[in-house]
Every structure is written in structure tokens, then in C-alpha cells.
Image (cartoon, grey):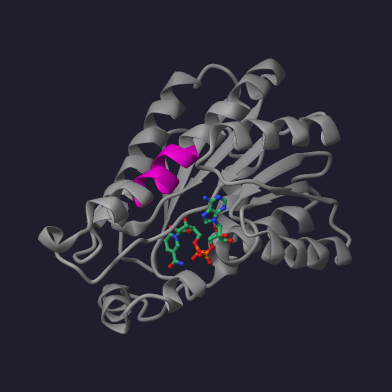
Amino acid sequence: MKRFENQVAIVTGAARGIGFGIARRLGSEGAAVAMLDMDTEQLASAESELSGAGIETLSVAADVTERAAVEGAVAAVLERFGRAGVLVTCAGMTGQTNLNTHEVDPADFDRVMDLNVRGMFLCIRAVLPHMLKEGYGRIVNIASISGKDGNAGMLAYSTSKAAVIGMTKVIGKEYAGTGITCNAIAPAVVRTAMVDALPEAQVKYMTDKIPMRRTGEIEEIAAVVAFAASPEASFTTGFTFDASGGRAVY
Ligand SMILES: NC(=O)c1ccc[n+]([C@@H]2O[C@H](COP(=O)([O-])OP(=O)(O)OC[C@H]3O[C@@H](n4cnc5c(N)ncnc54)[C@H](O)[C@@H]3O)[C@@H](O)[C@H]2O)c1
């Protein structure tokens, strides 16, 4: 079943890691995928991999923390495809980790919040007028189990992901009568470049908490996102789906 035939999905942070896996999954189910990322080199190779697999793609180089760049990116997608019914906001960073709160650099805190929270808001804000006009939209925000549970040593990241969950609830309620849904996914650890860059002690702390005793696979996260982004996920909004190997049971 091709759930995304004739649909256009914008995926932020699509050049690598989980965002790339989501772009590949939505594309393999028929979506044309606008791949948005600020890493132009990585974006070019990611885009050529997907287009080589027969997926219709558009690569959009943009920094999601810059309002003008985000608005320009969404305009470019609408110009090319005429629509954008799916938005997956995946661009994110951990910032410094393995530190207690009194050791956190306020400038690092600001960077993490700017990308993980404000950048997400800017992307959603730019796409909503189009979705409202169409009377249809699926917004899927990539949160984290740290936003539900709070990971010690990850103050800025956990705070930002809790904010993502809060933002998702507000948007879900505000647009509940419009055909637009907004949900989040809260993954536990997935071995990507982002996680490989963390101190091993921090990765062990997070992995030890997973009852399945293993890390998640990118494909497992993409599968949950694909459901939340699909037309059949029509009676769920403001919700945060779990993808944490049993760590969150709420
Ligand atoms: N990997 C995990 O264990 C894990 C767990 C839970 C949640 N997440 C979340 O999933 C998302 C993706 O994580 P990942 O592990 O794939 O990370 P990653 O670092 O491998 O990929 C992140 C992508 O976002 C892009 N990006 C960063 N800043 C950007 C900006 N300002 N503008 C545009 N693009 C930007 C990067 O270039 C990169 O391609 C993040 O939001 C992360 O918090 C990851």
C-alpha cells in the first residue's frame, strides 16, 4: 500500500540520521519529498541516494533557525509541487551533555532551544497557512524520551524536547477542527552520528534504561512517523507516540 501517493512531505534534518530515514520511508510509500537541511554537502548526497531509488525529491538548503530561510524554503516547495500536506520536523541537536545543571553553559542552552524549539516553531508556522487553505495537514514533530522523562546530564536537550511535546499539544488543539493534525514521536536512543558524538557514559546511561536492552533502529522510528503522517491517522492529535523500547509506558 502506498499511503503517500500524490502527497508532498517536507522533512527537516533530512540529510542524515533519523530525518533521512523518514524521508526514505515516506518516499518509498509514494511521497514526493522536500529534504530540508543546512548541511549542503550531506544533503546533496542524501538527495541523490533517494532520487536514485526513484523517489521524487527536492533538496532545500536552509537553516531552520532563520525565519527568512524557512519561509523561503516553504515557498520553494510550494512553487515546485503546489502543495505540502506533510511536515516532519526532525532537525535537532543535543548540545553539551554529561554535565549537571550548574555546569551548563547558557550560550549552549540558547543554541539548543533555538534549534529544537524555535526552529521547529518557525517551520510549522510557515507551513500552517497552506495546510489551512487545503483543509488538510499532518505535522509530526520529533521529540525524545528525554522530554518525557528528563535525562540527567542533558538539561538543555531534555528541556527543549519537553517544550516540543508542549508545543505539539497546543497545535493539536488549536487546529483540531481543520483537518490538520499535529503529533510528536518520542524515541529513545538510536545510533546515529548525533549519538556517536556523545560521551560514552551518557549513551550508556540512556541505553541502560531501555527495557528491550537495545537501541532503536532508524527504520523503527520512521515506521511510527509514517503512521502519524498518514491520512489514516485521522483521530489522533496533540499526542506523543512512544518509540522507546518500553522505556515510556505513558
Ligand atoms: N538519535 C537519537 O537517539 C535520537 C533520540 C531521540 C530523538 N532524536 C531526535 O531526532 C532528530 C534527529 O536526530 P539524529 O540522531 O538523526 O541527528 P543527526 O545529527 O544525525 O541529524 C540531524 C540533522 O539535522 C540537521 N540540522 C542541524 N541543525 C540544523 C539547522 N539549524 N537547520 C537545518 N538542519 C539542521 C543536520 O545537518 C543533520 O542532517 C533530532 O531532533 C533528535 O533530537 C534522536
Q: Position of residue 27 (x, y in %)?
A: 76, 54
25 displayed left or right of 112: right
For this rendering, which residue is in front, 16 or 106? 106
51 displayed left or right of 174: right
146 displayed left or right of 68: left
**Residue shown at 73% from the left, 30% from the top:** 75
**Residue shown at 56% from the left, 63% from the top:** 18
Q: Is residue 115 magenta?
A: yes
Q: How many marks?
A: 0
Q: Main secondary structure of the magenta part?
A: helix
**Residue shown at 32% from the left, 73% from the top:** 210
Residue 181 visible (yes or no): yes
Q: Height in image: 211 above or below 236?
A: below
Q: Position of residue 52 (x, y in %)?
A: 87, 66
Q: Position of residue 232 (x, y in %)?
A: 64, 39
Please state the extent of the stretch shown in magenta in the rendering. Answer: 112-120
Q: Height in image: 141 above or below 245?
A: above
Q: Height in image: 65 above or below 196?
A: above
123 displayed left or right of 77: left
Q: Height in image: 117 above or below 112?
A: above
Q: Is residue 121 magenta?
A: no
Direction left: furthest residue: 102
Residue 85 visible (yes or no): no
**Residue shown at 56% from the left, 68% from the top:** 218
Q: Position of residue 2 (x, y in %)?
A: 79, 50
Direction front: furthest residue: 107
